[in-house]
Amino acid sequence: MATPPIERPSRERGGGTYGELMRNRLIESRLTPNAISLTGFALCAVAAVLVWQDHLFWGGLAFVVGSVCDTLDGRYSRMSGKGTSFGAFLDSTLDRIEEGIVLAAVAVIFSQAGDDRAVAAVVIAVVASLMVSYTRARAEALGVECKVGIADRAVRVVILSAALLLTSFGLDVLDIGVYVLAVLSVITVVQRIWHVRSELTRPAPQL
């Protein structure tokens, strides 16, 4: 008679026993979405200081990790049920500050090099990135979903991080990255304005 197979914990089925155990332990821990948001903010503040001191590799790396924390806090909030209205507000506010302070450090580098055109591009990138977020928030207050556009926060983080890291390896592309960031952010603002206009001026369906 054949011996029945022994059942062992499996890693399959979407993470299996071990994945579920780790997730449950995280949920039961004292870790909160706000703690993740604040950790991401602290890392981006460190990134800004490192970039200002011309340590572009470590600054770019800290910015990447800090931005990853910003993507995790929302997921953890939904998964754990620990999210609050204030937490969502804090997360959105810190996102804007994080991007702004790192770009401000980049502007200092260009200013010290006497590159006024690149400094102006940084200013445009900062203003446009704030407007990308504002247009979505204002649209949603009017009842219009507004996630359109080619340069959301994730895309902007990739562009800036890549520019910092590549420049640290000897490829002088930081100014190019900022120009691309500024142009794409402005285009995204225009795309969102057009989208909201189209939605708000669309004729009501006939009953």
Image (cartoon, grey):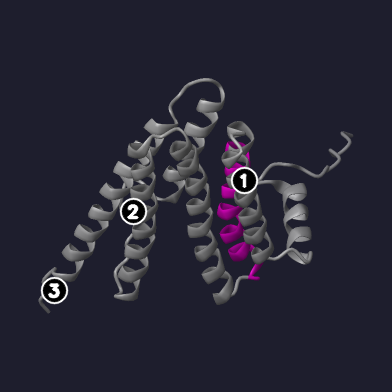
Above or below: residue 172 compared with residue 80? above
Q: Residue 76 at x, y = what percent?
A: 63, 60
Q: Quadrant of the N terminus?
A: top right
Name the dominant secondary structure of the magenta segment: helix
Question: What is the secondary structure assignment of the residue under circle 3?
Answer: loop
Highlighted magenta segment, given as a residue range: 60-82
Residue 56 found in image quarter: top right
Q: Which mark is residue 74?
A: none
Residue under the image location 83 percent in, 42 percent down: 8
Query: Between tags 3 and 2, which lies in front?
Result: 2
State how far apart marks 3 and 2 are (Cα).
34 Å
Q: Which mark is residue 49?
A: 1
Above or below: residue 156 compared with residue 81? above
Q: Which mark is residue 128?
A: 2
Give, as a three-letter code, the residue at label 3: Pro
Query: Which of pointers 2 and 1 lies earlier in the amino acid sequence?
Result: 1
State left or right for residue 132 relative to residue 4.
left
Query: Which of pointers 3 and 1 lies earlier in the amino acid sequence?
Result: 1
Above or below: residue 203 compared with residue 107? below
Give, as a three-letter code, the residue at label 2: Ala
Question: What is the secondary structure assignment of the residue under circle 1?
Answer: helix
Are the residues tagged 2 and 1 within 8 Å (C-beta)? no
